[in-house]
Image (cartoon, rainbow, N blue to C red):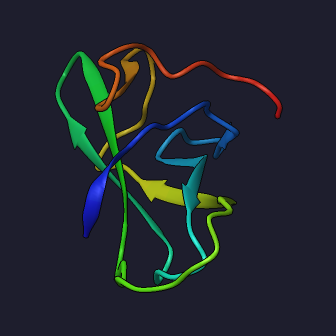
Amino acid sequence: MDGLRSVPRLARTTADGRSLTVPATHGACDDGPVVKALETDESVVLHASVRGARNGPCTSGSIEQDVRVDLRGPLGERILLDALSGGPVPSGDR
């Protein structure tokens, strides 16, 4: 996996709160985004990166893709944090 990336917002959660969908970015010369969660009793920290980044000529565009993140327990009242910024991940539409 290559480089830590920001998680800009929470797109949606499942009714039981055990699954989140967040947008994540990647480029045209990789295998797509990966988002992992570190869970504590008080927070869920989302760590976004890309899989399979390759060197060489590539377009510089950024592709946004929704990624589902499964949690061990419901999000509930826990704060959702972005590992890159250390700040809260806002809820909302694009």
Is residue 7 shown above or below 67?
Answer: above
Closer to the camera in the image, 44 or 33: 33
Question: Residue 60 vs residue 71: left or right?
Answer: right
Image coords of residue 26 (percent x, y):
54, 63
Closer to the camera in the image, 74 or 70: 70
Image point (45%, 23%), residue name:
76
Question: Residue 31 vs residue 14: left or right?
Answer: left
Hey, which quadrant is residue 6 in on the image? Answer: top left
Name of the residue lying farthest toward the left: 40
Q: Quadrant of the N terminus?
A: bottom left
Q: Quadrant of the C terminus?
A: top right
Closer to the camera in the image, 94 or 25: 25
Image point (46%, 55%), residue name:
69
Closer to the camera in the image, 74 or 32: 32
Image coords of residue 38 (percent x, y):
21, 41
Image coords of residue 45 (percent x, y):
29, 32
Question: Residue 63 vs residue 24: left or right?
Answer: right
Image coords of residue 42 (percent x, y):
23, 15
Image point (49%, 37%), residue name:
7
Image point (56%, 80%), residue name:
58
Hey, which quadrant is residue 8 in on the image? Answer: top right
Is residue 49 shown above or below 16?
Answer: below
